[in-house]
């Protein structure tokens, strides 16, 4: 498979595929097997319609109206009304990359062949994605069961020539966006409106992007901690394998090994008893804290991967078994819990990073570095207020990390009496990840400034590479300047740099 093409077959989607399509505009193609499964499913739907069978969402209303029979003559009107009535989202639009991820995952779920939708409808989604037609989806309004009804309805509006979409950086009415891309809207038939909106792809799309960024962040956390450890003349013994082998959490061992490798050859790092017996927890316990987050991310990535390749529609069409089953695969609880876990575990990377920042700038804690890392303290404030910013961000993260999944509000006349709030959980997790990048950027800036006072030539091989790359983007703080620009530049660079890949040729990290 080409790097510029993602083949969708309904069962092998990875987070890497999502990143390639959502961020790097890779094209999408449905496999022949995917088309075959969708055709078989649709043929069974047509059979059910011809037999006038009573099937939820096919010949009945939705939610509390599930006992209301709908005649075949009214089916098309019902599907159109479904999309329009459910498009109740509010708030600012989701990011384009989030919507692209959502579209890809919806295509993948429908390609499994359990939704009874015509292949041509799904192909239009593919053509929109490949042409860069991105529906405008408000970020608020989903309960996370029955799936992401409101936001996915805004996506579906564009397929029928309604709603709004971005095309070539312009926000347009849906029909105009399609026309400019040379595409035609479709007319929904029985079951198709429900198939398009009943699923967990919004929360999962947000979750996939956030999980990818958090994994990268966890590796950056080891890098910034290593540079800070050298700037503060930290003790190398805490990172030696002996300690971590007898508490064999995988993430802990990986983080300790990363910091040990990054600081190899350093003349700044010290041995136990050389300057002091032991370091503060934010240095000494970095592997334990970072490692716990790494282990959490493995669990989260597993849950996201399962959900990306799952059928989350209702009802589900089992054509081979001649059955239609109304179940609860649309319920977002697996992703809701995973996203709340992501929020908590990523917050901790920022929390411990902020404590290291404090040690770097505090003249009572920073091992004789200049107060607040200012070259001319008093006249200059140096990084004093950057630490304020980090403290503010981690405090905000603590509020955002309150789990969304513990809440539930009944809806649809109490028919839907337990909901996941998974999309809220995913949105909060994504914001925490972005916030954490800013905190780690501040740590990197402070650590690089501190190293300039120590002598960068004394750094280890890995930390020297990190220091040099930082200085390529932001120069030494010789005079006070607007640090907001520096923080933004470094944060964006870190988020857009896969440190696992770029460090491979210098000092391999895990």
Image (cartoon, rainbow, N blue to C red):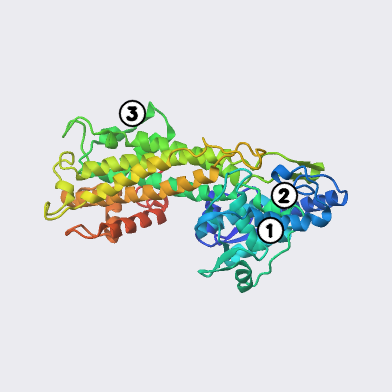
Task: Give the mark toward the camera: 3 or 2.
Answer: 2
Residue 461 appears in the rendering: no
Mark 2, other Cα within 10 Å: few <14 / some 14–19 / many ≥20: many
Q: Would you name the residue on which mark 3 appears?
A: 243
Return the residue nearer the eye: 286 or 106: 106
The crowd level at tag 1 (other Cα within 10 Å; few <14, some 14-19, many 20+) is many
N-term-proximal mark, 1 vs 2? 2
In the rendered view, does 475 fall on the left or right side of 78?
Answer: left
Q: 440 left or right of 147?
A: left
Q: Are marks 1 and 2 in contact (CB under 8 Å)?
A: no
Numbered circle sitting on residue 49: none
Query: Cα distance, mark 1 to mark 2?
Result: 11 Å
Asked which secondary structure carries label 2, the reply is loop
Q: Which residue is mark 1?
A: 122
Ranked by sequence position, the earlier of labels 3 and 2 is 2
Q: Position of residue 434 (x, y in %)?
A: 40, 50
Distance of label 3 from label 2 (alpha carbons): 52 Å
Quadrant where the C terminus is found in the figure: top left
Identify the element where label 1 is drawn. helix
Residue 3 spot, x, y in % from top left: 54, 60
Measuring 33% from the left and 29% from the top, which residue is drawn there? 242
Q: Position of residue 133 (x, y in %)?
A: 58, 65
């Amino acid at each position: 498979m080409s790097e510029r093409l993602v083949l969708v077959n309904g069962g092998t989607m990875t987070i890497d595929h999502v990143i390639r399509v959502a961020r790097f505009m890779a094209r999408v193609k449905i496999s022949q097997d995917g088309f075959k499964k969708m055709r078989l499913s649709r043929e069974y739907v047509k059979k059910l319609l011809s037999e006038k069978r009573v099937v939820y969402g096919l010949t009945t209303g939705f939610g509390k109206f599930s006992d209301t029979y709908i005649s075949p003559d009214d089916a098309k009107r019902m599907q159109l009304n479904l999309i329009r009535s459910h498009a109740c989202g509010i708030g600012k639009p989701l990011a384009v990359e989030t919507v692209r991820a959502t579209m890809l995952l919806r295509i993948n779920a429908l390609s499994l062949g359990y939704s009874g939708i015509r292949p041509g409808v799904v192909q239009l989604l593919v053509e929109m994605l490949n042409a860069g037609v991105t529906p405008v989806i408000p970020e608020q309004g989903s309960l996370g069961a029955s799936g992401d009804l409101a936001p996915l309805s805004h996506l579906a509006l564009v397929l029928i020539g309604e709603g709004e979409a971005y095309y070539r950086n312009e926000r347009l009415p849906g029909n105009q966006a399609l026309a400019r891309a040379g595409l035609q809207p479709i007319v929904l038939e029985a079951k198709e409106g429900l198939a398009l909106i009943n699923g967990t792809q919004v929360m999962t799309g947000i979750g996939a992007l956030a999980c990818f960024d958090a994994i990268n962040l966890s590796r950056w956390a080891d890098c910034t901690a290593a540079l800070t450890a050298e700037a503060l003349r930290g003790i190398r013994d805490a990172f030696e394998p002996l300690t971590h082998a007898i508490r064999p959490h995988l993430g802990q061992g990986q983080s300790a090994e990363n910091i040990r490798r990054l600081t190899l050859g350093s003349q700044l790092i010290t041995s136990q008893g050389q300057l002091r017996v032991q370091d503060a927890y934010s240095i000494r316990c970095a592997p334990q804290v970072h490692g716990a987050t790494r282990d959490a991310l493995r669990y989260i990535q597993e849950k996201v991967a399962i959900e990306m390749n799952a059928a989350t529609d209702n009802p589900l069409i089992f054509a081979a078994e001649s059955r239609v089953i109304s179940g609860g695969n649309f319920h977002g609880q697996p992703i809701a819990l995973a996203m709340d876990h992501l929020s908590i575990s990523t917050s901790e990377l920022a929390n411990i990073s902020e404590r290291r920042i404090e040690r770097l700038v505090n003249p009572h804690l920073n091992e004789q570095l200049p107060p607040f890392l200012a070259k001319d303290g008093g006249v200059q404030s140096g990084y004093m207020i950057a630490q304020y910013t980090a403290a503010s961000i981690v405090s905000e993260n603590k509020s955002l990390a309150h789990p969304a999944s513990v809440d539930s509000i009944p809806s649809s006349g109490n028919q839907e009496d337990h909901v996941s709030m998974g999309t809220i959980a995913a949105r909060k997790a994504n914001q925490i990840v972005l916030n954490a990048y800013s905190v780690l950027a501040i740590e990197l800036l402070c650590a690089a400034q501190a190293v300039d006072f120590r002598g960068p030539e004394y750094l280890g091989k890995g930390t020297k590479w990190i220091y040099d790359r930082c200085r390529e983007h932001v120069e030494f703080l010789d005079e006070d300047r607007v640090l907001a620009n520096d923080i933004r530049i470094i944060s964006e660079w870190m988020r857009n740099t896969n440190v696992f890949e770029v460090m491979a040729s210098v000092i391999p990290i895990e």
